Image (cartoon, rainbow, N blue to C red):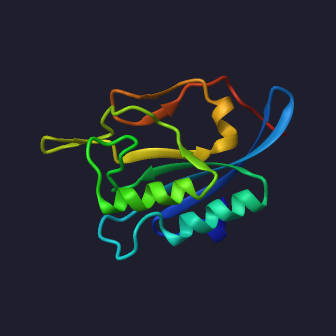
Amino acid sequence: MLPGFSCRDLVAFLIKYNEEGAKRRLVVCFAYLSYDSKDPPPSKEVEQLAGYCENENLYLVVECDSNAHQSVCSTNCNIRGEALVEFLNSSNLEILNWGNEPTFCSGGRLEVIDITLGSIRLLESIIGWEVSDHRHIKNIKHQLSPIR
């Protein structure tokens, strides 16, 4: 666990693994971007973590309840979504789940607000992405071998 990057709305873990003989370091975090935050997304904590990962040459994957409607995945767009896309355009992160398969279904609303962000350098390693029948986003990839 990365305690310096964990708080009420963010928890981050450092994972070391082998990929095709190469040692890799990956930070996986789970982020909740509150819909009623006075600041636009992403949170300061997510921005700081993204900067840390870039400076330390770490891959980053962010499973994110964005509470933002952005034009990349959602059927509509709002100010929060625009702010999130602006951040992504200025960072080394991309939205990894493409398409408009709803990730949030409640009260007749179908939205794509649960997104997965990842380091651009990870794009070549990802071979498939899908939303399961329980609306969780899951990566389909070869088995990673932990470093011992």
Q: Residue furthest left?
A: 108
Q: Relative to 102, say whether 8 is above or below.
A: below
Residue 126, image x and y in percent?
Answer: 62, 29
Task: Depth check: give the residue in front, 48 or 74.
Answer: 74
Number of marks in the image?
A: 0
Residue 53, image x and y in percent?
Answer: 70, 58
The answer to which image quadrant residue 16 occupies is top right
Is 51 on the left or on the right of 38, as rendered?
Answer: right
- The residue that appears at 43% across and 64% down in the rendered structure is 41
Residue 83, image x and y in percent?
Answer: 42, 62
- The residue that appears at 49% across and 44% down in the rendered structure is 116
Task: Depth check: give the residue in front, 15 or 33.
Answer: 33
Q: Relative to 139, say whether 110 is above or below.
A: below
Residue 98, image x and y in percent?
Answer: 44, 34
- The residue that appears at 64% across and 35% down in the rendered structure is 123
Location of the C terminus by quadrant is top right
The answer to which image quadrant residue 38 occupies is bottom left
Q: Relative to 78, say whether 140 is above or below.
A: above
- The residue that appears at 33% across and 39% down in the rendered structure is 103
Is 46 on the left or on the right of 41, as rendered?
Answer: right
Q: Is residue 24 visible?
A: yes
Location of the N terminus by quadrant is bottom right
Q: Is residue 6 visible?
A: no
Is 59 on the left or on the right of 128, as rendered?
Answer: right
Q: Relative to 108, say whether 10 is above or below.
A: below
Q: Residue furthest bottom?
A: 38
Task: Depth check: give the residue in front, 128 or 88.
Answer: 88
